[in-house]
Image (tube, helix red, strand yellow):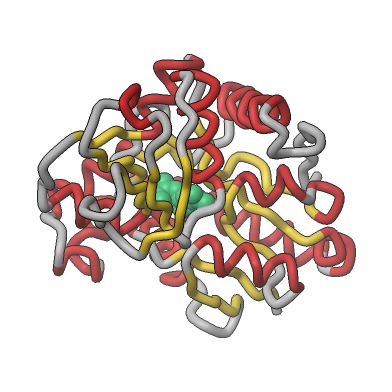
């Protein structure tokens, strides 16, 4: 049985909701966690695959393959990855920025945006949530970012998907579906079945966001219409344009010395 990491954010709800509707517990084993924790479990071999931070693939591409046609991306604003700031971006030079410990991709994206596209060098420290008394700005992702944005905090709220799109013209791929190579070799048949199930789940989910919102746990803290709007904002595809976006992200990370090489994307075929 394949063990799949499930990110505990609203952005993963539609596809997992549809997947589990058809195959309750007995076909796939799900392990829930935030991206940084699931990335670690993938590295350790504690899960077989998961929608995981794209930078995790960038760092260790020799250990992984990717599932085609699937991602968690944005073509412009993403609505759940924000730099909440007391000051405009250019004034963050030399200041300390708090970083969520849940993310691995967005922290690299922030460094690239600041350094390469805005000419800003800042310092970084971990933070648990929004703390603009201690930090000039804080990077938050996922449900914490959605909830914080809904509370409309004072100051600036920079959407990292939007900044990336403005700077490069490409989609930004926050998560890729990453599979450990041993699993792709050992359980190829099971993986191909899962891929077909996931692609069907993605397609069904797209037409059923309203219905999914009604029964979703997120509707306890987010208006259903906003939730549907959020899911329509996220792009779950991995088109050639998305792939160009990932490759550009890896090249930028390489230019800044964050990645030793900018790897190619290799898929389960
Ligand atoms: C779009 C988002 O992307 C997430 C951001 C990730 C990261 O920064 O490592 C990883 C997985 C994605 O679910 C989000 O946080 O809402």
Give the quadrant of residue 196.
bottom right
Residue 235 horizontal/vertical position (percent): 43, 37
Q: Nearer the viewer, residue 228 or 194?
A: 228
Give me the residue at 48% from left, 19% from top: 119
Residue 206 horizontal/vertical position (percent): 36, 45
Image quadrant holding the N terminus, namely bottom right
- The extreme front residue here reads 94
Q: Nearer the viewer, residue 125 or 42?
A: 125
Q: Is residue 101 visible?
A: yes
Give the quadrant of residue 54.
top right
Give me the residue at 15% from left, 58% from top: 222
Give me the residue at 52% from left, 26% from top: 115
Image side of residue 248 versus residue 98, left or right: right
Residue 85 horizontal/vertical position (percent): 25, 39
Q: Nearer the viewer, residue 93 or 265?
A: 93
Task: Report the label total.
Answer: 0
Residue 266 horizontal/vertical position (percent): 79, 40
In the rendered image of this protein, does residue 195 appear above or below residue 40? above
């Amino acid at each position: 049985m394949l063990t799949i990491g499930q990110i505990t954010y609203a952005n993963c709800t539609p596809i997992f909701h549809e997947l589990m509707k058809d195959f309750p517990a007995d076909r796939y084993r799900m392990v829930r966690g935030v991206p940084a924790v699931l990335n670690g479990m993938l590295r350790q071999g504690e899960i077989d695959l998961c929608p995981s931070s794209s930078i995790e693939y960038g760092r260790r591409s020799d250990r992984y393959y990717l599932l085609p046609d699937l991602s968690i991306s944005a073509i412009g604003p993403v609505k759940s990855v924000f730099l909440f700031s007391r000051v405009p971006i250019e004034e963050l030079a030399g200041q300390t920025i708090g970083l969520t410990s849940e993310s691995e991709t967005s922290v690299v994206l922030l460094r690239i945006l600041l350094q390469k596209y805005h000419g800003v060098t800042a310092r970084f420290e971990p933070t648990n949530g929004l703390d603009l008394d201690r930090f000039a700005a804080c990077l938050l992702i996922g449900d914490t970012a959605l909830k914080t944005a809904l509370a409309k905090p004072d100051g600036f709220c920079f959407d990292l998907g939007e900044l990336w799109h403005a700077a490069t013209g490409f989609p930004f791929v926050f998560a890729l579906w990453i599979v450990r190579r041993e699993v792709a070799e050992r359980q190829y048949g099971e993986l191909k079945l899962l891929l077909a199930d996931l692609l069907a789940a993605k397609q069904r989910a797209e037409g059923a966001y309203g219905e999914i919102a009604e029964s979703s746990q997120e509707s306890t803290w987010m208006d259903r219409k906003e939730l549907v709007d959020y899911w329509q904002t996220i792009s779950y595809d991995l088109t050639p344009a998305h792939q160009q976006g990932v490759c550009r992200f890896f090249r930028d990370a390489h230019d800044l010395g964050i990645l030793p090489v900018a790897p190619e994307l290799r898929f389960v075929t």
